[in-house]
Amino acid sequence: MIRPLAAALVAALAIGGAQAAPADSSASSSTSRSGNSFTQDPYPSTYQRIAAAPVLISGATVLTGTGQRLDGADVLLQDGKVVAVGTGLQAPAGATRVDGTGKWVTPGLIDVHSHLGVYPSPGVSAHSDGNEMTAPTTPNVWAEHSIWPQDPGFATALAGGITSLQILPGSANLIGGRGVTLKNVAATTYQAMKFPGAPWGLKMACGENPKRVYGQKSGPATRMGNVAGYRAAFIDASEYLRKNGGKKAADDGQPKKKRWWQSSSDNSDSEKDTGGKRDLKLDTLAGAINGDILVHIHCYRADEMAVMLDLAKEFGFKVAAFHHGVEAYKLADRLAAENVCGALWADWWGFKMEAFDGIQENIALVDRPPNSCAIVHSDSGEGIQRLNQEAAKAMAHAKLAGIDIPPERAIRWMTQNAAKALGIVEKTGTLEPGKMGDVVVWNGNPFSVYAHAEQVYIDGARVFDRNDRSRQPLSDFMLGQGASAGTSTGGVE
Amino acid sequence: MRRFIEFRRSRHNRLVDSFELACCERDAGWSNWGWSNWSSPTRSFLLIGLLLASMGAGAQELLIRNATVHTATAQGTLKNADVLVSGGTIRAVGTGLSAPAGAQVIDAQGRPVTPTLFGGITEIGLEEVSGEKDTVDDTLALGAETKQMTVRPEFDVTLAFNPDSILIPVTRIEGIGWTLLGAGTATGGSIVAGQGGIVRLDGSADPIGPRELFLRIGGDAAGLSGNSRAAQWMILDQLIDEVRGRISPDANAALLTPAGRATLAKYLNGGGRVVVQVNRAADIRQLLRWSARHNVRIAIAGGAEAWRVAPMLASAKVPVFVDPLGNLPMDFDQIGATMENAARLRAAGVQVGFTQSGDASHNARKIRQLAGNAVANGLPWEDGLAGLTRVPAETFGVADRLGSIAPGKRADLVMWSGDPLEVNAVALQVWMDGRAIPMRSRQTELRDRYLKTAAPAADGGMPRAYPASGR
């Protein structure tokens, strides 16, 4: 576990509450802005797990998400949690039994990069809510405020085994705004999907997109303009932070390093500096510097990732993950050494210049060093439905290059590692006792084009069953479509 | 329109500058398809090395022995079968064939062998980097704006084909041997996109077989027809009137050049194949009426809701090239999208092929995954393979040469590590005209450069940019 993430998790827990956080758990929102209070949540999670009888899945091949594979093993879910994983488990009274013979069981899949709800289907202009393309720096916007919970893509992603996902703003802006992590449950409001206690993400973007969007407007028009833009924003944030309590003390036991924005005194927050109008942009950036908001950077080229790592050092924040890093393989050792995840595609490349050097072994090479954190992500309503297949392609090409990656390791790319990047690995992403009962039962080895998620559990409740229409959610939007012809609608049926 | 948040340019999203929106022994059961049937990487490399060594010698005769041969013909799959190649052509398929003196012999060890696969409708060799317009040649837009529609059916994208494109080796080492170059539609062009044709990915410069005309119908093309799709039929009927001389070439309303009239004439009265990109069932119904009225041989690309009119398509003998991964209602033309589209069409008797709606060109290799998912959702496996071989070859007029393993066909072959429709299988060796293709591309060069550990500069190590920098 990466320390800043742990700190973020603790901070977020203090605000959001644990499982099924009641709406009033945001009582702290009236506290003064100091220390880590840049992450108050006036739009708190109202998620409530669906109560369900205990579930015992028995005799399955279990990939725990921690790198272990257990054959002929059982998984017991109770009260929304994973209670035990092993052999010969006893079913509690009233438990639902699932015969896992021939099945594979994995943690629920997690996509760290999704735009479901903010760029929903159908892709109508009225719902094109993913990029606030009015200025290059918009850390004040929150993706959650754009989410349309009726996006049919949530249900199709669920059929692909997705139990948690981060919804991010798009990549038009240098700093695009806050991302939010959801539990993939059907709901009328996004608050009812909001993952209790998950930290926000901060979306930033390198390279071509910001300069393409703003090159003929206000700028930036160049990569150097991009970097100047990030720096200007973080200079403002650092000043804001200084006036509002200063950076949280690092708890890593390392000697404190003086930053340029810090005044000579350790008590940099003089009373007279505190105050001023609250600034939503700077709240977000200050939260990022404090490690309470996790920084996710859309960045393709290895040299640009290196610039962003220097930027992070300059302003004292930590990069949780580089997204779409098609050149991450060129910098794999450094990413691992600095505890930065690489959220990657299996094979997309060439659609623009910064994607020209994509290779199919990218994920495997990023996964190779010790302490690596390779992640399979989608950025697509199609791809999110089959992260398992993306991983399988990466494994096959790794094998051809002489790198043998077993299923128990590869599953981590979309479970444990993804949970780490989102700051929720203490709660989900592995099948360890005490974790959320987020589980997928596959009809066989998931690393196959013929694999189907047969059952998907979220917090111990069976929210999808391929063989039971009564356990297949359908968004409001899909109701009645095709009714005039007497045909049913599409979707996952 | 398929909208990617990231800038993955697609032939389907030209109208909106939306960058921002920026077997296999099936009997064995798919779950058994791990690596058991695959030699170790070392052995694979040895095999490939052997093949390469013999290439320069101009191996004109080749015997692939002991393969699971998926013929993509009525013969189906032949186990423990041999394929004999001579002069770039398949001469015999069967068991216990003997190798002529001097022939190269490959023992497939039971691995699957297929024809090289169809890569879908792409812009391979027509675009190098989608986002760099100087490298993209597939779309004509002579008019400045939508209102200045230019209709140029004579536009032929194959004239821009670059056989040196790096996309070609990237694609063919994945077992994709041929593709249909498609013409795109854009503002300043028209719903009649122009012509394309089949190219083989062996580095040859010219297309083979007949040309195809590309047409786009539906809501996402309404911007090209005065904002109503109803006008698409009005425009098409007018064009036919021009071809048939019912509108004077000098008339103010005339849209076609003399070359355009001559080109379009070739596609009427049962002539050349017209590939129509269309999704909505209602539009497909209109299309079938229109094509019957003018005796136009069509094929459908996309066809998200084609399953709703499957019996009509079957009786009209219209092949449909689907993207089985497109199960979301991406727009109001695709409300009925389902992963079972391919299976339902086939069950109704429609010939089903595959083409991608994403970045079909750079990632053309993904088309196998499309076929595999169609099979995972009800399409018989043989039809999955046919959609990548026989169906496109027959539809686009090259079945006499490509798309099956049978005597007389070009020896464009692939040996696979496993089920060719599986994401966990890879192409181990590709032959074009019976010659082993080097299994190298710019991407394998990049891979190998970074696969090695770089020697530190402090130890005198040279940067990776130097040929012998690794250790």
Image (tube, coloured by chain):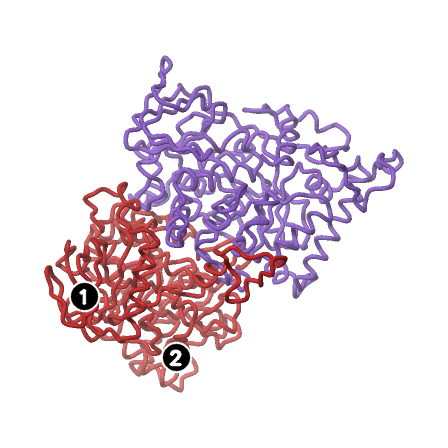
Chain colours: A purple, B red
Q: Position of residue A480 (x, y in %)?
A: 37, 41
Please identify the quarter of the rendering in which residue A144 is found.
top right
Q: Is residue B26 above or below residue B58?
A: above
Question: As drawn, is A220 to the left or to the right of B150?
Answer: right
Q: Would residue A240 be seen by someone viewing this image from the given angle?
A: yes
Q: For the residue carrying disc 1, how many other residues have a C-alpha within 10 Å: few (<14), some (14-19), or many (20+)?
A: many
Farthest-out residue, front: B459
Q: Which residue is mark 1?
A: B63
Local secondary structure at mark 1: strand
| Amino acid type at image mark 2 | Leu
Tell me residue B18's x, y (percent): 53, 59
On residue B159, which mark appears? 2
Quadrant housing the C terminus of chain A = top left
The residue shown at (22%, 50%) is: B24
Q: Earlier in the sequence, mark 2 or mark 1?
A: 1
Q: Is residue B228 visible?
A: no
Frontmost of labels 2 and 1 is 1
Instruction: Read off the chain for label 2.
Output: B
Q: How many marks?
A: 2
